[in-house]
Amino acid sequence: MMSAYPATRRALHWLTLALLAALYAMGWVLEDVESAATRKLLMTAHQSLGLLVVILALVRLAAAWRMPFRPADEIASWMERLAGLTHAALYLLMIALPVSGWAYTTIKGGSVNFFWLGKLPHLFGEDDNLADSFFEAHELIGIALLALVALHAAAALFHHLVLRDAVLARMLPILRRA
């Protein structure tokens, strides 16, 4: 029988998902916002939440390093390795996506303001061509992250609905009672 992840890890997992959903929604809406004031407000919120995702990802990595959670015995070793690679890629992309946005913003000549508390330093000097490349990278990393999140969710559902093991219940303990 697999034990549930600690409550803190579960909370960080679902908070990260909620933040990512909000970030994707803001990213899509930003393209169509005409009001400069609303666009600036949304952009600051988008940047701040993106940086918060980086912080949460680093906290989650530190927690996993300090207190590793033993995989279940009933999971095939190839599934365990694939899950490890997927998680590593998720963390990498959760960090790379906001960093690419930060780079794009500063190369374009703008500033990244973290929750109106202060501005982050510029990473590079202004360069429109380089900025365009970073914006494309930001979009591609975003698509890759979205695809990996979908794969992650599909794998959890596969475990729950097809294999009928307790993998999903580790993150959603309420499923144990159902």
Image (cartoon, helix red, strand yellow):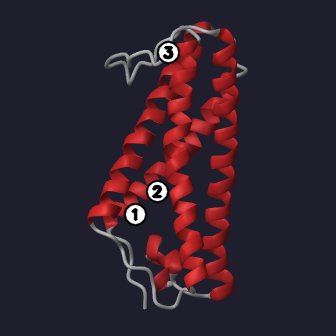
Residue 154 seen in render = yes
Residue drawn at x 67%, y 68% is: 154
Q: Residue at x 60, y 80 (%)?
A: 78
Quarter of the figure with residue 24: top right
How many discs mark residues in the rendered view?
3
Q: Examine the rendered structure and indicate whether residue 16 appears above or below residue 110.
A: below
Q: Could you tell me the amino acid type at mark 1?
A: Arg
Tell me the CA gap for discs 1 and 3: 37 Å
Residue 69: percent from left, percent from top = 36, 74
Q: Is residue 147 left or right of residue 38?
A: right
The image shows residue 38 at horizontal and vertical percentages of: 57, 15
Q: Is residue 79 above or below residue 111?
A: below
Answer left or right for 58 relative to 66: right
Disc nearest the viewer among 2 and 3: 3
Disc 1 + disc 2, Cβ < 8 Å = yes
Query: Could you give the CA–CA distance between mark 1 and mark 2, rounded to whole angstroms?
Result: 6 Å
Residue for badge 3 = 124
| Residue ID for mark 2 | 14
Q: Is residue 157 or residue 148 the one in the foreground?
A: 148
The secondary element bearing badge 1 is classed as helix
Q: Amino acid at mark 2?
A: Trp
What residue is pinned by disc 1?
Answer: 10
Q: Residues within 10 Å of mark 2 (few under 14, many from 20)?
A: few
Observer-nearest of 171 and 147: 147
Which of the marked residues, 1 or 3, is nearer the chain's N terminus? Answer: 1
Residue 138 sits in quarter: top right
